[in-house]
Amino acid sequence: MDQYIIKGGKALAGEVCINGAKNAALGILAASVMTDDFVTIENLPDVRDINVLLQAMESIGAKVERVNRHTARICGGAITSVVVENEYIRRIRASYYLLGALLGKYKNARVSLPGGCDIGSRPIDQHIKGFEALGARVRIQHGMIEAEASRLAGNHIYLDMASVGATINIMLAAVLAEGQTIIENSAKEPHVVDIASFLNSMGAKIKGAGTDVIRIVGVPSLHGSTYSIIPDQIEAGTFMMAAAATRGDVTIRNVIPKHLEAISAKLVEIGAEVEEFDDAIRVVATKRLGHTQIKTLPYPGFPTDMQPQITALLAMCEGTSIVTESIYENRFKYVDELARMGTSIKVEGNNAIVNGVAELTGASVCAPDLRAGAALVIAGLVAEGYTTVEQIHYIERGYECFEQKMRELGADMEKVNSEDSKAIQKFKLKVG
Ligand code: EPU
């Protein structure tokens, strides 16, 4: 099994370039099969979740050509099946976007019920409510979710919570429904906007993405397009935290600073310097940072996908911080792993009371999910001595070349096979 080995203690410095947004890419790839024309998607991140979705699309007959590492040409015209039952697909949450896409196009779809990171129960009742409102019959049988309709007709849908996935899935099905669909209390995340922009570039008529009311006028068909995905807000935020935690000076390139405002604001509040440029952001920390209170909220609030990383940072800052998780019920599982490195964090319900400690020490830890894995790496970059992070396949779901990018910023970090004692020894000899 691959693991990261890290020797902590180096301040990160230099520049890092951010890849395309994983969560936008997942929706955009699913949407790309909604036309029979070829579609070219640029700035695709080369991460596990994306590659799994591409394989699943191929398994139903879609043509997928990898033009280069970050560009794919896709043609949904050759689709022969609406049943997506790839052995890997249920491991990724966003497999359910194929349900909205295929239901919209073929009025019929069967997709394995999604899995994803274990961060709490993740119902899909709002997706189902939306599909049913458009006229589909939805059933869950034998681990598959099935949706079919003789025709889809626009409707007025009020989401009980601003769910990112439900907003995107309903939008996908509704672009090819007859008449107007209004989604109220829709999610406003940047990737919702990006997926809507992509669909519009294919001829859809979507207005209001990025606000809490999205209006869609159905069109009979979509056409080909070439589209470049927005930068990944969470990858950027993760490097911002790593820069601050190591008291470094890092310029993060290929970002949209507006998408990072909630993260930047918290860093400034605890004493880091954050400088914004047109498409870059620089984070500098020269001293031990201070404490704060954070509550995760839908965009434009502080993102839940940055909660573990900022908790890791606050665990080494001065004073007591409170982190409240309001999106997921079980997103503090990594706290016990952080504790192995000497942190002092007490979880009470949805709150983590984080008592900053002056020093962390390296330990062997295990990534319980994607973002928590990134948080453990951040702690490892600061901890005295060696840290090994296991189960890095979670981290590789969402971060491209994570260890390489960290190394380019000066970190002592490598990916090694846990059985390869020679490689581990070699790393230790190299970094001293
Ligand atoms: N929810 C319901 N019913 C639904 C849908 C959602 O109760 O039908 C609840 C969920 O249980 C959760 C909350 O609403 O408590 C928010 O869920 P949402 O639907 O917004 O999340 P998601 O679409 O499943 C996406 C990202 C997550 C990210 C969340 C929140 C993708 C593929 N995943 O998930 O990303 O945490 O939005 O921003 O876009 C990650 O990248 O690490 C990740 C977990």
Image (tube, helix red, strand yellow):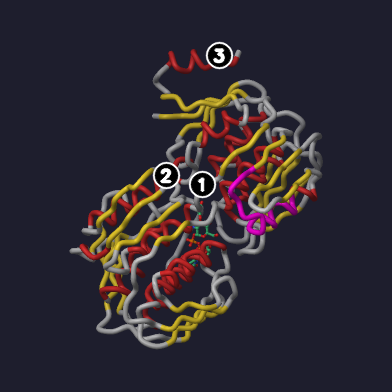
Which of the 4 image quarters holds residue 75? bottom left
Magenta stretch contains residue 365: no
Instruction: State the residue position of label 2.
Output: 46
Identify the residue shown where x is 26% and y is 74%: 106
Amino acid type, label 1: Asn
Q: Residue furthest left?
A: 80
**For residue 430, which numbered disc appears in the image?**
3
Identify the residue shown where x is 34% and y is 66%: 224
Q: In this rendering, is residue 90 above or below 341?
A: below
Q: In whole angstroms, how far apart are the C-alphas of marks 2 and 3?
A: 29 Å
Q: Position of residue 338 (x, y in %)?
A: 61, 36
Residues tagged 1 and 3 counted as in contact (Cβ below 8 A): no
Which one is earlier in the sequence, the residue at label 2 or at label 3? 2
Residues tagged 1 and 2 counted as in contact (Cβ below 8 A): yes
Identify the residue shown where x is 35% and y is 78%: 176
| Left or right side of 90 for 423 | right
Mark 2: secondary structure: loop
Q: Position of residue 331 (x, y in %)?
A: 56, 51
Mark 1: secondary structure: loop
Q: What secondary structure characterizes most of the magenta part?
A: helix
Q: Which residues are magenta?
A: 252-266
- Quadrant placement of the C terminus: top right
Mark 2 packing: few (<14 Cα in 10 Å), some, or many (20+)? many
Amino acid type, label 2: Asp
**For residue 19, which numbered disc appears in the image?**
1
Mark 3: secondary structure: helix
